[in-house]
Amino acid sequence: MRATEIKPNVYWVGAIDWSIRDFHGYSTPEGSTYNAYLIVDEKIALFDTVKRPFKADLIKHISQVTDPARIDYIVVNHVELDHSGALPEMVELVKPKKIICSANGKKALLAHFHREDWPYEVVETGSTVSLGSKTVRFIETRMLHWPDSMMSYLEQDRLLISQDGFGQHWATSERFDDEVDRSELMYQSAKYYANILLPYSPLVQKLLADVRSSGIEIDMIAPDHGLIWRSDPGRIIDAWDRWSRQETVEKAIVVYDTMWQSTEMMARAVADGVQEGGVSVKVMNLGACHRSDVITDLLDARAVVLGSSTINNNMLPRMADLLCYMKGLRPAPKIAAAFGSYGWGGEAVKLINAAMEEMNFEIVDQGLRVNYVPTADDLAQCAELGRRIARAVRGEDGG
Ligand code: FEO
């Protein structure tokens, strides 16, 4: 890869991680990128670095534009190690006059690298730094998604360098939104939002309102992961608005794990009932679908139906994993129900219901349990549960 000029004298100088497949529990089958940006003006500023093993790529790309030793400022928009892992070595190499970060950014940098001697300059929302012909304005975005997070806005270029905001985990040789498949881009963006930003949706709403009221015009959004939004930045802003309002569509997901396919038979019968009720349905076997893909589909689903066999008086471990992960992401309440096959205890359905109640889901049925292998009558009841879910999704009755 080479450095790419994204605006006059503004360069992408990051790194492509073609191999990463797991990002602390989030599956990344298409890899990721760690974007860093270099602005060459009277002062030269580097915005974020990269994950430590990719330091050589960062230095190579900077060197295609200028001598790294000429960098005056390093701006740390976000301290998480995928963006600051290479920072200590870059500080050694560059000896920057300033390391610009938020107050929480300074705290987090000290807690990570224990370097009191670095030349920190703390900025807050509204602070500006002149690079010569270009002015950078900072916007703190606390808890989006770390306390230190902030964005940098280049006034003359109307360019928002948005750290994790508006990003996607997707490794490509292309740098811009108009160079890749749009559906895939929006899918990867939705997956990123659902798995990283979902718990902070009220703060996203506030950020979008603040940006709207500030009157700043955005011509391009350059995130720290994935593609740069140059053709239509409004598209991803609108999507974030929708996702952060947790808007749903007439869709249900039926997610299950199974021991001897009895719970799977139930899942398919429930899904048949949902479809008969005129609602879109997706069946997701946890043996085949990663938790982070389930969460992506949960984002706009109005209903979730969870199934697990009972094992050792509990649910199957992959269902417990999903519920633990889902609870942490604090989705808005969904229409919900549980089902599962059992041999003698049958606790899984009750435990799934309890977990869904903790998330304030609207449980429309106390759940279906089937002893060992479902009969035709049992499957008919599953289909009826599906139809009941569909009616609730369509708002036709209380389920
Ligand atoms: Fe891409 Fe929150 O780090």
Image: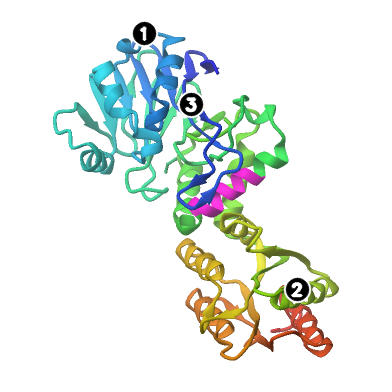
Disc 3 and disc 1 in contact, CB within 8 angstroms: no
> Mark 3 to mark 1: distance in Å?
18 Å
Residue 194 sits inside the magenta stretch: yes
Q: Name the chief secondary structure element in magenta.
A: helix
Q: Amino acid at mark 3?
A: Ala
Q: Amino acid at mark 1?
A: Asp
The tag earlier along the polypeptide, 3 or 2, is 3
Ligand 1 under 8 Å from disc 1 Cβ: no
Residue named by callout 1: 67
Q: Secondary structure at mark 3?
A: strand
Residue named by callout 3: 15
Picture coordinates of residue 169, whole percent (x, y): 55, 40
Question: Residue 394 shows which numbered tag?
Answer: 2
Eyeballing the image, is 381 above or below 25? below
Ligand 1 under 8 Å from disc 2 Cβ: no
Q: How is the image coloured?
A: rainbow
